[in-house]
Amino acid sequence: MDVVEASGLGKRYGRTWALRECTLEIPAGRVAALVGPNGAGKSTLLNLAVGLSAPSAGAVTVLGGRRAGSPAALDGIAFVAQDTPVYKTLSVADMLSITRSLNRRFDQPYARARLEELGIPLKRKAGKLSGGQQAQLALTLALARRPQLLVLDEPVAMLDPVARHDFMATVLAAAAADGVSVLLSSHVLTELERVANYLILLSRGQVRLAGEVDDLLATHGQASLEELAMTYLRENPPSEVTR
Amino acid sequence: MTTLTTPARRGEDDARPRPLPWRRMAGVTWRQHRIALIAVAVLLGALAVYLWIAGTSLHNAYDAAVACHPQSSAACQGLDNTVSGMDNFLSNGYILQVLPVLIGAFAGAPVLARELETGTFRYAWTQGFGRRRWAVAKLTLLAVAVTAAAGAFGALLTWYYQPFLSDHQFLGLPRTSPFAPGMFDLRGVGFPAWTLAAFAIGVLAGMLIRRVVPAIATTLVVYVGLAFAAAGFLREHYLAPLLTANPNANLPGNAWIVSTWWTKDGRVAFGDYPPASILNQFCPPTSSVKGGGASEGWGPCLLQHGYTMWTSYQPTSRFWPFQWIEGGWLLALSVLLIGAAIWLVQRRAA
């Protein structure tokens, strides 16, 4: 099963194409990293995949052919958006309750245990939590939905190194233990080195490279994911696609 | 989870799950908007207590004045004066005029604007409940709650204002038309209908503007424009006004006079006020005929010279038909505005 399948996918804002001619298949069971410089179209692709925006061209399906944004798709995907938005005036307990009400599945014991482990008090207002704790709360809420696919948009961009490490550890634990497929975007390549086994390289709204990390490294003769991405972006300046 | 009846569904997705029950949004809506809902309840509750106390003493004084015999006695005059002195509750109700728009703007505008401003819509619209159903449930629940609270308060206002609209003209109370601005939209279905309209304007403004404070400001401006348009231009046209010549004899006490004009020999002579040429010809402004109003100065004089004064008016008996007409179009408008907001939620790109 492919967790994300896009064909000829494009998104235009006004006269600018944020994403063009995007065709890819992300197989299940991977931790897939969506990398590329700022403005490459990473958030656009993720928003299309979770159904927050509608394509201007082409189509995208998720979890084996479900239309992105359809009830069946929403049921199986948990999304943590950029800057991990939570309702700042609500308590952590309220956030749990709301997320539980809004979803078919919600693993309350997991969520409570996880928050206790993290030292996040249930009575605390979400807005009073540190940035790292807010991110962990958003991630916990997403994982407690027991999704088949977890989508994370720049999840660690705003976090300090310790919080980054903790956040990624939680993601990896979920991927390993529960077989959750993960699709995450980042412009910080070093973060992805340890976690990703599938890579999609985006630049200027187009897919430059996609595949298993091991295969890509072997094919292109690079030692690390970061080197591969940097080399590829340098050697293939995307100027020919700009208009 | 219960799986009592799951009829085979034909849809675009074979694995299409059964939608989550609507009732789940009740708790979600309460948790997210309890501060606004409690604020509305406290505001209206405090005013209701005040209104109840003021209304009880007003009704008691009114009943005493009506029952007093003989009316000309000094004791009865004193009771009349007591009632007359009570008509200044919250500046004659003008302060209450701002309640619907305050409730509507502060409860309605942030509902979607705050989600868009803080980015939490990315959370809310990707949950299993689905964004269209999320918007439908949340907006319906809040609209019903706000309208119900305003409806209860409107019923209390209707009761309070009864003495001012009675036919007991022996009282020194000012003769108030039930159609007067401030009387019409505070009573009956007017109050909840205008509150609902303000809420709906706020919701759509919030969806379009995506910022809480500008959305509230826009709601205030749009609402005031709509309220003035309704009071100044729309309301008098709900039903064709009745027509009478010789108003002094026929016009019921506190009817709403829409317009007056004068005719002579079957032709319209002038509108509210005669031109100088007519006045100079028939009723020159001498010491006996002062410029004054139509009822004292030139009015009776022109009647003697073959002029007829026509008055178009809305009788008091049309109060309730007018209330339902206004409530009806405000309800339709509110449904339309909230529907537009839901449509925008469904199609808005992130």
Image (cartoon, helix red, strand yellow):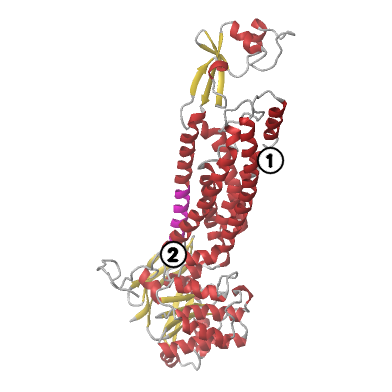
Q: Is the magenta stretch mostly helix, strand or loop?
A: helix
Q: In this view, does B42 lie to the left or right of A186?
A: right
Q: In the rendered structure, which segment of residues is drawn in magenta?
A: B334-346
Q: From this viewpoint, which residue is outermost toward the front?
A: B69
Read off the chain for label 2.
B
What amino acid does circle 2 point to? Arg
Q: In the rendered image, is residue A45 in sight?
A: no
The residue at the point 59 percent across, 28 percent down is B168
* Residue B91: mark: 1
Badge 2 marks a residue whose secondary structure is helix
Depth check: give the residue in front, A223 or A11.
A11
The residue at the point 64 percent across, 75 percent down is A128
Q: Counting residues from the N terminus, which is met first, the one under dot 1 or under dot 2?
A: 1
- Residue A73 at what x, y percent from top left? 38, 72
The residue at the point 54 percent across, 60 percent down is B111
Badge 1 marks a residue whose secondary structure is helix
- Residue A159 at what x, y percent from top left? 60, 81
Residue under label 2, please give it: B131
- Residue A163 at what x, y percent from top left? 60, 85
